[in-house]
Amino acid sequence: MSNYIIKNGLVIDPVKQTQSKADILIKDGKIADIAAEINCSLPLIDAANCIVTPGFVELHAHFREPGFEGKETLDTGCQSALQGGYTTVCTMPNTNPAIDKEYLVRYQKLRGREINKIKLEVIGAVSKGLAGQEMAELGKMYSAGAVAFSDDGMPVMNSGLMRNALVYSSQFAVPIVVHQEDHALSGNGVMHEGPTATKLGLAGIPALAEEVMIARDIELIKNCSAKLHVAHVSTAGSVALIREAKSKGLAITCEVTPHHLTLTDSLLAERLYDTNLKMSPPLRTANDVEACINGLLDGTIDAIATDHAPHRFDEKDVEFNYAPNGITGLETAFSALYTALVKTNRIDLLTLVKKLSSDPARVFNLPGGTLNIGSWADIAVIDLNRGFKVLPEMLATKGKNTPWLYQKHYGKVCCVLVNGEIKFVEESFNGAKENL
Amino acid sequence: MESSPPLTNLLSIHELTRAQLLLILATAQKYKSLMAESIRYQPVLHGKTIGLLFYEPSTRTRCSFELACRYLGAHYISIAKAGSSFVKGETLKDTVWNLRAMGVDLLVMRHPVSGAAHYLSQKLDIPIVNAGDGMHAHPTQALLDIFTMQEHIGTLENKVIAIVGDIRHSRVARSNIHALTKLGAQVRLVAPPTFIPPGIEQLGAKVYQNIEEALSADIIMALRIQKERQLSGYIPSTGEYARLFGLNQSCFNTNSEGLIMHPGPINRGVELTSEIADSNRSLILKQIPNGVAVRMAILATLLGGHQNE
């Protein structure tokens, strides 16, 4: 079991809500002590000029294995997570086969342990084959360790199935995660409905497509004890609906992506028809971005989740309508948000760290995401002052489909520990070299 | 004439400078005269090869490009979706790289996806002419429309042009709005509210929902109503559309002198009645030869066959 002392860093503790210069003592893979000055002879990780945070917790990633290994594998996905500062990742079940059975949940968890990079958690399907018709075996998947259930990408349009899934899942006390999109309203839309879509001649996806489904599901949970988690909230109306539902004490949580917190649909008129700006839900307006930021700040939005969705280069290198939805996010989440929101004083560093770590862990009731004494040492060391250009060759994910390509970011993840073991050291970071 | 960078592609009217637009129209005027001669042949593009790639059906646009190529002495290869490797699943990128490897000097493309012409221009180092991409743009149509308007009513400065029909799905409407506003015309859009896309006013047009308001315009352009819009719920029926927004004789009882245009193909009895389509106020068949002249001007300009003076 590994023992380290992390010294000289600015420790950001999202649970205690503190940020202070402190040393962290790691013994037997767990956090043994955090204090201003700890003197010991354990192997040193020098975090001078860096912040030290809990490893981030991702609620929403697509690692594509099994079935779509050309886009991503569990191995490249886990490596990508590490390089983004993540130590726990929950994967979505839209693989081939879809993760809709107990043995498939077990398989993925076993592969995660075999790869041994981060903690891989599995989200099972709500319906068999993600077909939206019959409920999948939620209880068996739960017993195999599924942390939530979702038909992500395929909204559950069948209200009867959704109601039953919510009521049925309440016995396990794990959330049903929903991609909210009324297909009758989104139709053949490929970007946010509005003036930019009109100008570009692209079919629009109205904000309503998301909002009416959230409104429906809020009604559905009113008389049962189910937990509803709304994936990737993107509109001001959605934030308002969830804020109101929370104020009535309903068991609803939600997440927002880094891109919905920083980018708008008007970018498509600048980078004409760039398929790396195509995702579902689509980029919305400046007003929606503002509402999402405010929702994050007032607690309406519980967590930041990336919806990491890798695709092959050639799949995205086609006419706009033919390109698949989705962008990758794990390796750029922190730096994109730090650069766009913290450096500009829109949100504070503590809130950003909290929404990437302890808050998502709480939503899915996962053990990670804190620096609590006695917890597993899942830790990220990040150099806020280091600027870098996001280059395809530096990304571990197979999916180079990110709108931040060639952009200048600040906040480089330098070193990541999982269960107290050093799993990643950025090549120019010298603070942990002697331990390799 | 105002100076402007030379044209390298024709992807949309929006991206043209006013000077570039005027230059194409002036060049088209010369080719229009050629069209009236007994031998229509001016081989300024002798030896050049032009690819015509049509992923959507077309009669007017395609035939006028073919004739434009012939009149200018260029070779052309004409590819339709059916019968091409598209049906075998070949991507656009691979298809056009192969055409380029065969020596094609310029590519004209019609495609059902908005932005496809921009995509193509990023993949190739030869001039691209957008012959219609999805709902986005149809610049050669707008140019021939403008050319026809100027022929009949002179300068478009402060003239009122009404566009009636399915604005939402129309690349012709979008390109015409850009062209007309660049030339100082006032554009009125008339359609059922489901055919008005959000934010269209930001392109510089005014929205009306009453056909009466269109009729005082100098020119009324009717757009084709596609049958499938009824199925997707935008309108209850083409019959109801004809009743509320169709152009017919009784619309013109007053002293209105408005001229009628239509990009074709027309649905007789829907957008306009036969009496209107075939009347003296109709410019529909006058638009057609102008389509050839404008496309000759564009091909010649892009391939350097026309010397700017």
Image: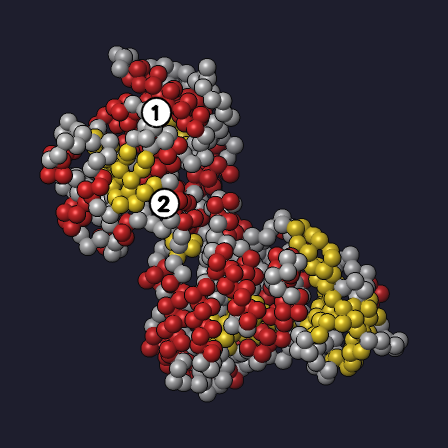
Amino acid type at mark 2: Glu
Q: Which residue is drawn at 36% across and 51% down?
A: B198
* Secondary structure state at the residue bearing disc 2: helix
Apparent side of residue B63 relative to residue A10 in the rendered image (left or right): left
**Image coords of residue B34 (percent x, y):** 31, 15
Residue drawn 43% across the image and 48% down it: A196
Let me know if marks 2 and 1 both belong to one chain: yes
Sequence-wise, the earlier of marks 2 and 1 is 2
Q: In which quarter of the image is residue B290?
A: top left
- Apparent side of residue A68 relative to residue B116 in the rendered image (left or right): right
Other-residue count near label 1 (Cα within 10 Å), few / some / many at <14 / 14–19 / ≥20: many
Q: Can residue B150 be seen in this view?
A: yes
Q: Dot 2, how many residues are within 10 Å of its Cα: few (below 14), some (14-19), or many (20+)?
A: some
Label placed on residue A425: none
Q: Residue furthest top?
A: B38
Indicate the chain on which mark 1 is placed. Answer: B
Nearer to us: label 2 or label 1: 2
Residue tagged 1: B294
| Residue B214, quarter of the rendered image | top left
- Give, as a three-letter code, the residue at label 1: Val
User: Does residue A423 show up?
Assistant: no
* Chain of the residue displaying label 2: B
- Which residue: 57% across, 69% down? A297
Q: On the image, numbered disc 2 is attached to which residue?
A: B201
Is A420 left, or right, of A87 in this rendering? right
Marks 2/1: CA distance? 28 Å
Q: In this view, does A39 lie above or below A412?
A: below
Horizontal and vertical percent for residue A279?
A: 48, 57
Helix, strand or loop under label 1: helix
Where residue B31 sits: x, y (%)? 34, 18
- Against A400, residue B91 (above or below) is above
Coordinates of residue A415 in the picture (x, y in percent) = 74, 65
